[in-house]
């Protein structure tokens, strides 16, 4: 007789509609002055930036557990399950956001290794191993950061005209502040977070240039084989596929907001062959570059000589 199987526990996924009052502006600050223990993990449809302001606890992410305390800051990505099995006077602030809906300008932020470390690499590493190289703000830095949080919180609470713009601006200040803090903290010792964050920053600065696995391996201080394996394990895709997707994302922005022709966009983001660019664009976005242009684009008709 076959042995009965234990039913797999379904992890509750918190919906965006349960959290954000305005579906067009998905940003919220939630203070939790007394977080009790909880053994049941949950996940979100959105990102969560957590700041520990008091006490200590055990944080479980997936199957990994580690201790957290005052000043620690971490990001929980969508669909990532987590909970706090043990707490001791734990007080925290959850900053809930949907980056895809806020449409925040990236500018030169991607050049900061700390940005990639905190918002991309570290959350993924935390699911795979007991990660020790986490961001912990000094009390002085924590105080400065909480002042920015309070400004965003006031804007969201007062609901004056322009509050969404101002709250998003304060949220950008939070991201910049933490990215700089993490960049300053990253040690020179070669660790996955350091290595992959450096590669991501290099890709952001040089995505339009011809890059090879060996080039990226030199940036990381790893062998090409080790870089390929580590990058794929953390970012869920090989380095050059990540680069192609980054170029397509940059191209999408140019097509929507600029006045360049498809061939000019292709060259601007690092594709030498516009036909190959079109194939990759369709593969990743499901549409052609011309279909992605804004409707009023004048270059839909040939330019006069």
Image (cartoon, rainbow, N blue to C red):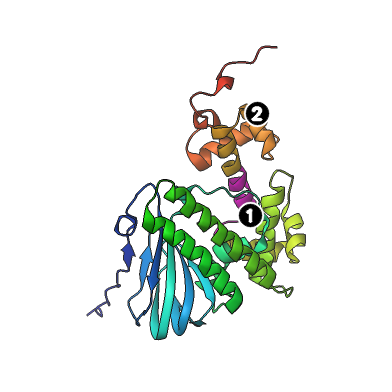
| Distance between the alpha carbons at the discs numbered 2 and 1 | 27 Å
Tell me the number on the disc at residue 263. Answer: 2
Instruction: Estimate the x, y position of residue 258 in percent, counting from the top left.
Output: 60, 31
SS type, badge 2: helix
Q: Residues within 10 Å of mark 1 (few under 14, many from 20)?
A: some
Looking at the rendering, the stretch of residues picked out in magenta corresponds to: 236-247
Tell me the number on the disc at residue 66. Answer: none
Depth check: 227 or 27 in front?
27
Residue at image coords 37%, 66%: 43
Tell me the number on the disc at residue 109. Answer: 1
Give the quarter of the figure containing the N terminus: bottom left
Depth check: 274 or 204 in front?
204
Q: Earlier in the sequence, mark 2 or mark 1?
A: 1
Residue 272 to residue 175: above or below: above
Residue 196 forms part of the magenta stretch: no
Q: How many marks?
A: 2
Depth check: 160 or 226 in front?
160
SS type, badge 1: helix
In front: mark 2 or mark 1?
A: 1
């Amino acid at each position: 007789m076959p042995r009965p199987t234990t039913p797999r526990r379904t992890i509750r996924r918190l919906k965006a509609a349960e959290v954000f009052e305005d579906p067009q502006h998905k940003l919220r600050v939630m203070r939790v002055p007394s977080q009790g223990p909880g053994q049941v993990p949950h996940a979100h449809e959105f990102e969560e930036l957590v700041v520990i302001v008091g006490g200590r606890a055990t944080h479980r992410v997936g199957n990994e557990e580690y201790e957290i305390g005052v000043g620690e800051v971490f990001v929980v990505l969508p669909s990532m399950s987590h909970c706090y099995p043990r707490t001791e006077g734990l007080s925290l602030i959850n900053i809930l956001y949907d980056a895809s809906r806020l449409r925040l300008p990236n500018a030169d932020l991607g050049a900061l290794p700390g940005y990639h470390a905190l918002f991309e690499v570290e959350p993924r590493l935390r699911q795979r191993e007991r990660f020790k190289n986490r961001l912990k703000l000094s009390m002085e830095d924590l105080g400065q950061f909480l002042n920015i949080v309070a400004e965003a919180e006031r804007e969201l609470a007062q609901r004056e005209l322009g509050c969404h713009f101002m709250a998003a601006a304060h949220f950008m200040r939070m991201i910049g502040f933490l990215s700089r803090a993490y960049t300053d903290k990253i040690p020179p010792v070669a660790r996955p977070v350091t290595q992959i964050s450096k590669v991501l920053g290099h890709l952001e600065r040089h995505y339009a240039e011809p890059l090879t696995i060996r080039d990226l391996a030199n940036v990381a201080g790893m062998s090409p084989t080790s870089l390929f394996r580590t990058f794929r394990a953390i970012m869920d895709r090989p380095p050059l596929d990540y680069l192609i997707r980054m170029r397509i994302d940059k191209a999408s922005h140019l097509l929507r907001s600029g006045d360049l022709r498809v061939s000019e966009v292709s060259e601007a983001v690092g594709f030498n062959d516009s036909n190959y660019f079109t194939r990759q664009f369709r593969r990743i976005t499901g549409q052609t570059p011309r279909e992605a242009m804004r409707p009023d684009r004048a270059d839909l008709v040939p330019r006069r000589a």
